[in-house]
Image (cartoon, rainbow, N blue to C red):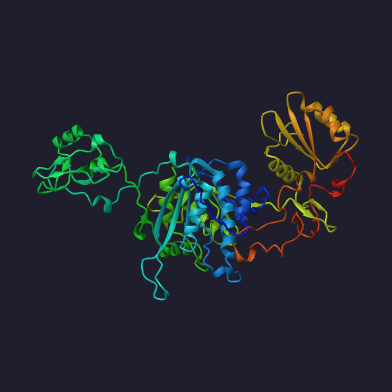
Amino acid sequence: MKNQKLELTWISKDKCPKLESRILLEDAEKSYHTQVRSENDLFDNRLIFGDNLLALRALEQEFAGKVKCIYIDPPYNTGNAFEHYDNGLEHSIWLGLVRDHLEIIKRLLADDGLLWITIDDNEAHYLKVLCDEVFGRGNFVANAIWQKKFSPQNDAKWLSDNHDYVLVYANNKEIWRPNLLERSELSDGRYSNPDNDPRGVWASSDMSVRTYSEATDYPITTPSGKIVNPAESRCWFVSKDKFDELVKDNRIWFGKTGNNVPSLKKFLTEVKEGMISLIIWLHEEVGCNQDAKKEVKQFNSKDVFDTPKPEKLLQRILHLATNPGDLVLDSFAGSGTTGAVAHKMGRRWIMVELGEHCHTHIIPRLKKVIDGTDQGGISKAVNWQGGGGFRYYRLAPTLIVNDKWGNPIINPEYNPEMLAEALAKLEGFTYQPSETLWWQHGFSSERDFIYVTTQTLSVEQLQVLSDEVGDNRTLLVCCAAWRGITIAQAAERFENLSLKKIPKMVLARCEWGHDDYSLNIANLPMSEEESASSEINFPTQIKAKTGKSAVKNQGVLFEEDGNE
């Protein structure tokens, strides 16, 4: 039983989505930067509009292992949104979608990175076991309690709920240590000086520890003559010789009568660097729901966001988990609290949001932060004066769609540059077109490159490519087709080239055309009976748009010339 691994089981647990790794398209009109720049400003922050899960997948290639702190506030499975489901199906759907997010999140985290999740009682304990399964039980750090309300609800049917949980998991608990909290008047208030020690005020701390050692298990005689021993299965934390030195230095307190169990005196002057965080977070320290509502009203008073989190709560999380310049990610951005707080604290950030409040709440909020006109939340505490900026992205549409005859084709919305970037990403290449080499659209190493074209290539064209690539480099050629040579003949003749057909090379890779994996009841997966029977779930039809499409006549993509 000791080494047995416990796992949650739910309906369709083994069915994981084959996510499309989409590219991101910047909309410069929605990006925003300060007019007055300073040396420490951070500008390459990212706000991404699109499905949360697809956006995480889109970020994975570039940011795997680089994110220091991920905070998510997923939709709570309260049961209200799932009234049309029964037999626990809503619970299974929720767990499956959260599991899919967690698996990508783990890959995005740095080795010393941390995940923080706010959740309530409905799913907290199942989520804990699910996180144990994904991150490993040994990487569980804490389950903090956040006091989100401070007065009882008179309409509560049973007991009045006034807290949420903050689950904390490390990617590798052995190498992560939290930053210390700044000392407060409240924490310093427990220090006093009952024996008028000239070194100043002090607080007593327990001298015993749980790690047992015979060398530190000895009796102590108090000044009153009483003999005391450490509690059963515990011992003192110092040897007898060290204890005698501490007594001579007046570092041991036996109480005013000299009859108490000894304790160690810790002087305030010696602990000024900070203190360890407790895991009960009161509203006076980290804010509450009312504080959060007041904060979001400052940038949108007409449509107040339903479930914002207070800036002081995110400040506590980011202070414990990060340092200035570290990268923070929130894939359920909501009203944008994470990005606003990270910006004010000098952290780099990425936020993802699918809802329209990305435009009605987050962008107006971030603009005020950047302009320095947002003086609510933690602004005064960190002396925020404005600066920096962010870049706005949207997820590209699906790469593969069906034409009116039901054939899979390259989405007409893709221009040649978008197509090259998309295929480079799907093949594991970094998209970086060369300014001098027309055939070099990206690279996977210093000697391995990719070239994307919608042409059907002749043997003569392949020969030109092979000659230009040379002997010390290799090139993946993604094209509509090739003629005059078989794939086996090409491999033998052009050793530095690998050939793949568009779009056949990627048809089985992903769930094309699936745009929404969100935890929204309106977008939940259909039952097996309702879902499409085809293995690749494309939209049934799309009308080609006029403009700069990657391919004018896509019929050539499906030539059956036998040259495979």
Q: Residue furthest front?
A: 1
Asked if residue 42 can be seen in this view, the reply is: yes
Closer-to-camera residue (373/363): 363
Give the percent coordinates (x, y) of residue 460: 88, 31
Percent position (x, y) of residue 184?
A: 29, 51
Residue at the image position 19 percent from the left and 36 percent from the top: 243
Q: As drawn, which residue projects farthest toward the top?
A: 471
411 horizontally vs 443: left or right: right
Q: Indicate whether 356 appears above or below 39.
A: below
The answer to which of 396 and 69 lies nearer the viewer is 69
Q: Could you tell me how many numbered marks the image carries?
A: 0
Which quadrant would residue 313 be assigned to in this image? Answer: bottom left
**Left or right placement of residue 322 versus residue 58 in this view:** left
Could you tell me if residue 386 is visible in this image? no
Seen in the image, is 455 located left or right of residue 49? right
Give the quarter of the figure containing the C terminus: top right
Give x and y (percent) for residue 402: 80, 55
Q: Nearer the viewer, residue 563 or 55?
A: 563
Residue at coordinates 80% horizontally, 59% vertically from top-left? 543
x and y, in percent, of residue 72 in the image? 51, 54
